[in-house]
Image (cartoon, rainbow, N blue to C red):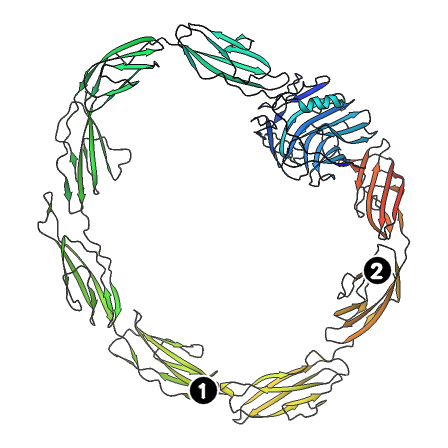
Amino acid sequence: MKRLILLLPVLLLITNTVFSQLPTTSLVAWYPFCADTTDHSGNGNTLLVAPVTTPSVITTPPTLTTDRFGNPNTAYLFNGATTLMRYHTFFSAAGDFSYSCWINPSANQASTIIYNGNVNTDGYGLMMSNGTFGTAGNEVSFMFGGMGAQLSASVTLSQWHNIVFTRSGSTYQLYIDTVLTGTFVNLFYPLVSSDVFNVGLNYATGTYGFNGKIDDIAVYSAQLSLTQIKALYHFNPDVTPFTLGNDTAICTNSVVLSASAATPAGQYTWGTGTTTIATTTTVTVTPPVFPGTNYWLTITVPYGCTSSDTVNVREVVPHVRIGPRDTTFCAGNTVLLNTPVRGETYMWSTGDTTGRISVNTAGTYWLTVDSSGCFGSDTMTINLKVQPLVNLGPDTASCSGNPVTLQSSVPYVTPTYLWGGLPSLGPGVTTATFTPSVTGTYWLTVTDTSGCPGADTINVLIVYDTFTFPQVDTAICMGASFPTGVTINPNIIYQWTPTTGIATSNVADPTIVTTVSATYVLTATYVPPLTYHGVNCPVIIDSFHLDVQPNPVIAFLGPPRSVCKNDTLHITASVSPSSYTHYLYSWSPGISLADSTSSTVVFTAGDSTSLVLTVSTPHGCFAKDSIQINVHQIGFDSLIAPIDTLCPGDSAKLVVYLRQGTYYQGLTATYQWTPTIYLTNPTSDSTWVHPITSQDYMVVGTSQFGCQDTAYTTVHVHPAGVIYLPDSVTIYPGQSYQISPQTNCLTFSWTPELGLNDTLFSNPVATPLVSTNYIVHGVTEWGCVAIDSIRIHVEQNTIIALPNVFTPGASVNNTLKILNTGLASLNYFRIYDRWGNLVYSSTNLDDGWDGTYKGKAQPFDVYVYEVEAVSNTGFIVQKQGNVTLLR
């Protein structure tokens, strides 16, 4: 199908004025989105909003937003994902029709605006794309289901545009902002759909979500004329916002109610409550209207939205009431006196002129109110009740950490109790006594038969521990200092015993420096007087043991020692002071030792090493010493030989090296190679080998100390490289040929590069545009080289064909595919039934029809196909014909 793409003029700003009337002839549905989804045409085709559940999609409702006139809640915002509106059935596709809506897209997108039917299979509607179905862009398209975009034109993002598409017979037209952007003629009518009328999303599959605002959707059962399209373009369904003003009061006069100065056009309806009283632009309210009446006005635009406001009109008759005639309250509280009557002036018996007063003494009080020239007054008497006396006694303390029992010393008549305190008591305690176990401030509220509460507060000190003693039994190294870390309390006298190692023994936190282990005791005594609110506080004693461990000294382990490999040495350490019996021994490295945790170790000579001894106490007091042990041995560091690198006719050098390093300084050796076959010098550390077959060799080296070592190697002679290719092959334009040589090579290099997918593959794919000779150099995994070539002849003719019969489900001919030679790309492959219905379409050369449509097997019949393809040289190949489907 061809599509027409035109650039649109920029949308002009639209004022909030109604320019014309809505065309109503043949109107099927009209949705001005007056904060709802009601069909204002009167036909009852009201839209449903999400959440809507189908077997494949769950959606959420769009949100109300500002329309193109700046009026809030008169357009809907779609989120580009799952927002959806719908009418529960498919609008009739018979005869002519017109669809109109306003859109304000937020971004390039592939989305549904309005669609009558299923986007993927049938029906028709408006979508956004880049002119191609399913690809994001800023073009509005008129689309048949399953047939792609028919008319497309671009729009400006983030601006309002009016979109209208119409049908008259087989002619379809697309208008954007009243400008005709394209005409399309199609003899296929839109297919009858079992789906619904969608707004903003494909209801059947939950795809193509619109991103932006949609407003004022119209559905007509006839083609609109350009005059009607312009009238629809300028029609404003919104009512200009208005107000009836502030609530008002009257005494003996009347008041005229009317809308604000900018009176909007439309139908006026006045009422009170649920009763309509007038349809004029104003109403007159006269007394009596006590205690007040709410008057409402609703203005409705024909085929549009409504706007309402309410005002309260009341007659001012000051029925003053400041409270009951007599009242009683508890001493210490206040009573608020006021009246529900609104007035211009107030005069209280206290001389106050405000609308309310607070009093806390007994007496008689009155109020006079002036409301719009009408006066009213009221009087009341206030009496006092006495609160009960509560006494919890003086503040108290408990130095031993024991709880304290609290109780009021004053009796009451049928009392109720409520205890509170800090820290919080949770829901509170309601018993006559309360026993707190932590320091805090506590209070008791008592309410007796008078109904008035009394309260008292007391502070309680619970002394559990007057200082922090963090130490437990511990150990230190001899000569180290140890901080005791006890917290200081200025109300306590401290004394440490014994005093050994303590410079000042009567402070809380001295530092101990001693060479003798001991148990230290701290005695804490309260400074006289030893009482708090009459409570005696006891002496506190705590202690810890300090274990002083020696710093060990290791006797000299001796000079370096020499030993032959695999011999043994006995090494004994001497540590002082010897009187300490809890030393821990650790020799490192311990890999050559039978036991690395004793004072005497047995060393088995492996490699030369330095043994390090660490002696420590359990606390970590330690000393270190070491001894060097040199191990004599001979060894080959490496044997250089062409183990896997020789091809027939090659020569190589065998070289053996003695190990290097500290252990091998001054080492010399003699050599003997066996067997001597193919060798030039069998008694040297290096010799040339000229093998014709693979051979194993051994060399023995003897040091000047008589130590021997042996090395082995195998010299491999590998097969020569082999490559075999046919002389030439023939291909067609667009075809490729995979070159598959017979070879034992591992790596390859092809020339020339032109037309090859990779020059290093063993079997590259060749797609030359012209006939080409390709040469390959191959190397085996052992480096042996081989060379061969092939000529690929390119035949420039292109062939395309299809079978005339196929049987779905059979072992052969079960899929109808294009048979081609030299084809580069496929523009389309379409199959129609005898009624012209498109049952299959593809642009993939490898795909084929399996004989189904919409998941259903198609019957035995003759079907029509059409194919258009392009060769790699740009030649267009077309083919049409019939195919018989057999079952």
Foreground: 263 or 176?
A: 263
Residue at 76% over, 71% down: 745
First of labels 2, 1 by sequence position: 1
* Front residue (pair 335, 339): 339
Quadrant location, the C terminus: top right
Give amino acid for label 1: Asn
Res 630 label? 1
Residue 226 is situated, as x and y percent measured from the top left of the image, at 75, 23
Quadrant of the frame with the N terminus? top right
Amino acid type at circle 2 is: Pro
662 left or right, relative to 805: left
Residue marked by disc 2: 768
Separation of residues labelled 2 and 1 (CA atoms): 72 Å
Q: Nearer the viewer, mark 2 or mark 1?
A: 2
The answer to whether residue 189 is visible is no
Left or right: where does residue 768 sit relative to residue 107? right
- On the image, the x and y values in percent for residue 134 come to 71, 39
Eyeballing the image, is 290 above or below 465?
A: above
